[in-house]
Image (tube, helix red, strand yellow):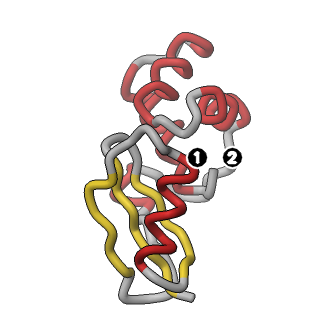
Amino acid sequence: MALYEIETSAHIMISEADTEEAALEVAREHYPEEEVLRVARRPRDVWVISKGLLGIRGAAAPDTNARECLARASGDKLHAIRLYMLDTGTDLHEAQRAIETNMSLGW
């Protein structure tokens, strides 16, 4: 199986699939109300996110609050950031860092 990057109007998903059509089915199954904008086969069998690009320095541990906000927001990053700000009282920058860090840790 190959890795496919599937971009919809609100999400970017990475999924294993045998074919591009099978990758499209993943998006249709999980986000049927969203338009699929792009499907691309990844050139390697691994997906890498730069911690430095996200502003993460040193080891990072999962944040239970951030993961809960992501779950309540059904993976919608912007909504999760808003929920995190409301729940914790942090500013936008810190909330974004917490949510994106936890997304990179495999939420």
Q: Residues within 10 Å of mark 1 (few under 14, many from 20)?
A: many
Residue shown at 32%/74% (left/top)?
40
Q: Is residue 11 left or right of residue 3?
A: left
Q: Which mark is residue 62?
A: 2
Q: Residues within 10 Å of mark 2 (few under 14, many from 20)?
A: some
Between the C-alphas of marks 2 and 1, the distance is 6 Å
- Please identify the residue farthest to the left as the structure is shown: 37
Image spot of residue 105 (x, y percent): 60, 56
Position above or below: 99 against 25:
above
Residue placed most toward the observer, 75 or 99? 75
Residue located beneath label 1 in the image: 102
Q: Say what secondary structure mark 2 lies in.
A: loop
For marks 2 and 1 on the same chain, the one whose residue lies earlier in the sequence: 2
Q: Indicate the amino acid at tag 2.
A: Pro
Residue shown at 45%/29% (left/top)?
94
Question: Disc 2, disc 1: CB below 8 Å?
Answer: yes
Image spot of residue 87 (x, y percent): 61, 13
Residue shown at 38%/22% (left/top)?
92
